[in-house]
Image (tube, rainbow, N blue to C red):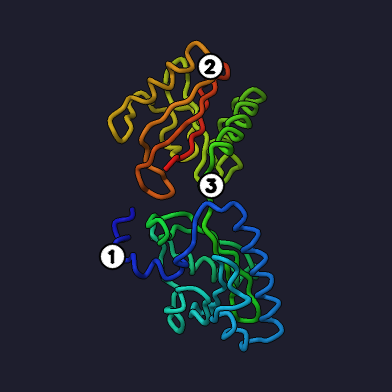
């Protein structure tokens, strides 16, 4: 899926500030605050604001910056390294997964006036493709935007998500399993998700990242080092209600093989797991 990433790496990095560090949990609110400030400034100054957005100053907030498109997709201003795209039409530019996210931004702004778009972008800080979100708002025929990288899930988040998942299964197993596999549901947080394996048949009953695995034999899986980690998972909760395990797994967000630490719970005839990446 990312076969074009190397060739496009230089271009993909234009919208990524060099010093950006992914994983900061408060980037979302900061991005929204910067967007609100930029919109208010543009409404007051109109196109005179474009020069201000493109200079170091009040609209550079730590690692965040403002960029502006016109309604046809031409980059008009940028306070980050995407300034090299100014005066170029980026409407059909695609992210690392081939998604035309600028086009989605333009179409949404035309219909709703504001919104957000998620895409996968090369973070030059760690040279990995990571999820990024841009908040945007249309003012006249200008689309003003601020983007930030989504944080990687922490061990604490993974434990909390596992507890929520275990409670949901206890309350209504059928409803819970459907919710875990809903890619737009509230059991997927950053790069964290819930998976469930039946203790009686070792088959996946839910998988938040790869729902196509549901119904398949989990024991057939091996980690990146050939380890039969599913069998180890089942053994670790065989005689107790919880456990932990580490294995090498491909992060569906970064598309890199990383060390994953999963927390496990046994609820009825289900093994419930949530893992976080430790790299």
- Cα–Cα span, label 2 and label 1: 48 Å
Tell me the tag on residue 269.
2
Q: Where is residue 239 in the image (x, y as percent from the top left)?
A: 50, 10
What element does badge 2 sit on? loop
Q: Position of residue 66 (x, y in %)?
A: 57, 73
Quarter containing the C terminus: top left
What element does badge 1 sit on? helix
Considering every residue shown, the one lying at the far bottom of the view is 48
Q: How crowded is mark 1: few (under 14 residues within 10 Å), some or many (20 or more)?
A: few
Q: Position of residue 100 (x, y in %)?
A: 44, 65
Q: Is residue 222 visible?
A: yes
Q: Nearer the viewer, residue 30 or 199?
A: 30
- Cα–Cα span, label 1 and label 3: 27 Å
Question: Would residue 10 be found to the left or right of residue 23 on screen?
Answer: left
Going from the N terminus, do you reach mark 2 or mark 1 first? 1
Residue in the picture at 54% in, 67% down: 105
Q: Are marks 2 and 1 in contact (CB under 8 Å)?
A: no
Tell me the tag on residue 190.
3
Q: Residues within 10 Å of mark 2 (few under 14, many from 20)?
A: few
Residue highlighted by disc 1: 7
Question: Would residue 100 be found to the left or right of residue 48 on screen?
Answer: left
Going from the N terminus, do you reach mark 1 or mark 3 first? 1
- Cα–Cα span, label 3 and label 2: 28 Å
């Amino acid at each position: 899926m990312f076969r074009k990433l190397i060739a496009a790496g230089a271009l993909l990095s234009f919208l990524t500030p060099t010093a950006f560090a992914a994983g900061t949990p408060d980037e979302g609110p900061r991005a929204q605050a910067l967007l609100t400030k930029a919109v208010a400034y543009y409404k007051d100054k109109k196109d005179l604001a474009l020069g201000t957005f493109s200079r170091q100053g009040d609209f550079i907030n730590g690692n965040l910056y403002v960029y502006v498109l016109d309604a046809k997709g031409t980059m008009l201003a940028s306070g980050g390294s995407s300034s090299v795209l100014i005066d170029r039409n980026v409407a059909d530019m695609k992210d690392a997964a081939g998604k035309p996210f600028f086009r989605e931004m333009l179409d949404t702004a035309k219909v709703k006036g504001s919104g957000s778009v998620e895409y996968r972008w090369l973070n030059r800080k760690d040279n990995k493709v990571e999820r990024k979100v841009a908040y945007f708002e249309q003012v006249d025929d200008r689309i003003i935007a601020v983007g930030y990288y989504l944080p990687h899930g922490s061990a604490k988040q993974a434990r909390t998500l596992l507890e929520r998942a275990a409670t949901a299964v206890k309350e209504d197993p059928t409803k819970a399993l459907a919710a875990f596999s809903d890619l737009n549901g509230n059991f997927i947080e950053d790069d964290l998700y819930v998976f469930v394996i039946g203790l009686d048949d070792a088959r996946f009953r839910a998988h938040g990242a790869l729902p196509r695995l549901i119904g398949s034999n989990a024991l057939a899986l091996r980690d990146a080092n050939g380890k039969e980690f599913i069998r180890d998972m089942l053994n670790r909760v065989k005689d107790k209600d919880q456990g932990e395990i580490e294995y090498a797994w491909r992060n569906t967000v970064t598309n890199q093989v990383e060390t994953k630490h999963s927390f496990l719970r046994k609820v009825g005839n289900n093994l419930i797991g949530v893992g976080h990446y430790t790299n």
